[in-house]
Image (cartoon, rainbow, N blue to C red):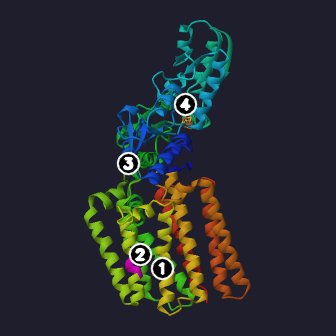
Amino acid sequence: MIEFVFRMKKKAQITVAKSAGFCPGVKNAIDKVLELAAQRQKTIYTLGPLIHNKQVIETLREKNILAVKSAAEIKEKGAILVIRAHGIPPEEEARIRALELEVVDATCPLVKRVQENIRAYARKGYSTIIVGDADHAEVLGLMGYTEGRGFVVSGPEEVPGLPRLEKANIVAQTTQETEVFLAAAAAARKIAGELEVSNTICNPTKMRQTETVEFSRNSDLVIVVGGKNSANTARLFQICERLAKKAVHIEREDELEKALFQGAKSIFITAGASTPTWMTDKVLEKARELAGHEAAGLMDHLSFAWRLVVTGSLYTALAATALTYVCMRLEGAPVSGKFLLMAGLFAFSLHMAHRAAEKGGAEPDKARRLLFIKYKGATRLVSLASGALAIFLSAALGWQIFLAAAFFWAVGMLYPYKLPMGLEKFANFPASKDIVTAAGWTFICAYAPGLRQGWALDNSTQLAVFFVFLLVFMRSLLFGISHAHSDLIAGRENFYKAAGPRLTYFALFSIFLLLSAILFTLKGSGWRPELAAALLTGMLYYLALMLFFFFGRIPERVASEALIDAQFLVLAGLTYYTK
Ligand code: SF4
């Protein structure tokens, strides 16, 4: 997560930990179950909840992913049962594999490494000392690999209570505190004849702890966000309590009180491994409000108005209008107000409808609550009315445009819901959402203006179609990255979720190179060189945006969306000044 520093009038500085957000193990387990749910079209069971967050669990349940305490609760034959990131003991795994179930292992590879370590030493006759929480699922799983010679201690003070051990291997629960583990290892030297020290704290935890120590020392107030029953969050809190002047452990932003911020000039916000980024963002929002209470005024109102514009899809409507303008210039078609308005209304209507149906596991922020909860009915009505108006306008542009616009609008409106006639399968096709979005925008922004002029098969129309499809597809990829960064739950219909980060960035950079090469060739060949040069310059904005995202400098969701859609405004601005 980007390190975010926000200065207010009172000079309180708020820093959010770069390491906040789901750890790779949790992310990987969530991705795995989403992939299964999309591919298999049946209930997916997980052995225990994937994470302890009400909203995320609710979203997973809506996607037919249910947590069970034991395999005995599953009555269907051949059901899919997922082992979560913490792992389970080998005997339990053997037992569930013997049942009529399809077992999918989503144990974090870093936990697996600890299991292998324990097994290897246990086979050589070593006893195992695990420094961790005796009743934590990961530790219960690790105990199963000790061949009956395992001991759990919560810290160094419990080590002297262990029996004398000939040969022992001391390991850590992956989320253990380094200091506690090293102290326990030092104590274990006194009770073991031969001691192997295997520091199995995972790297994401080490990074989180190092950052927490560094910032806690220099902070007046540290806010630790995460479940009260989360062991790793509790450990983070212990570190902060020791080092910072003041520290609090909260689950939700509404637990923060103004009195906490009195006299706090430097505030640090960190979070446990299973705390979604969107929850940390909400805490940041609340902390800003409470710490900068006296600064609340015009800027706060403007900032909220801006969030409403972006969240309420007006900004996307403007972006679609700008892109249509670029297409008309590319095609050499006269700039038509009707087309610009139709494109804006079309994008607004569908974007709002999708927003209203969105369930990303996140609790809505203030703007979303207002638009999609408090005034839900009015929002739906405005979305439908804009769509109807867009189709009405399309009727004035010719029957072909009318039919196609009505088709794309109907598909777009139905997409977030259950599709009829087996179309559900298509909706679950990897990246289908990104493809449908790109196709809809391409028709409205690029193809329709050419069609209206009778240039449907002209090279300039084909070029605009190709150009827009790829640009809008890139937009969807960037949205996917931004949503994943916020730990929002999306299915494989999103390219990023289906293909993963590497392939997504590969696709982004490839499309960027392809489009740049085409524009460069067009400019060189003398095809409207000024326009080609303007669009080529606009590609620099993409490059900057991609590099920014690639190096992890991804701002929070609303700012990300605004930056992504600004690409079309940049292109329209650049083309406006060309012949
Ligand atoms: S805390 Fe570390 S070991 Fe545990 S699931 Fe996350 S990445 Fe894996």
> Does the stretch in magenta take in 188?
no
Q: Is residue 560 visible?
A: yes
Q: Which residues are magenta?
A: 404-408
**Magenta stretch: helix, strand or loop mostly:** helix
Q: Is residue 312 visible?
A: no
Q: Does residue 193 sit above or below 451 in this rendering?
A: above
Q: Secondary structure at mark 4?
A: loop
Q: Label 4 sits on what residue type?
A: Thr
Q: Secondary structure at mark 2?
A: helix
Q: CA distance from mark 1 to mark 4?
A: 51 Å
Q: Label 2 sits on what residue type?
A: Phe
Q: CA distance from mark 2 to mark 1?
A: 9 Å
Callout in the foreground (2, 4): 2
Q: CA distance from mark 2 to mark 4?
A: 49 Å
Callout in the foreground (1, 4): 1
User: Circle 4 is placed at which residue position?
Assistant: 175
Residue 487 point in image, percent of width and height: 48, 49
Contact between labelled residues 4 and 2, with CB atoms less than 8 Å apart: no
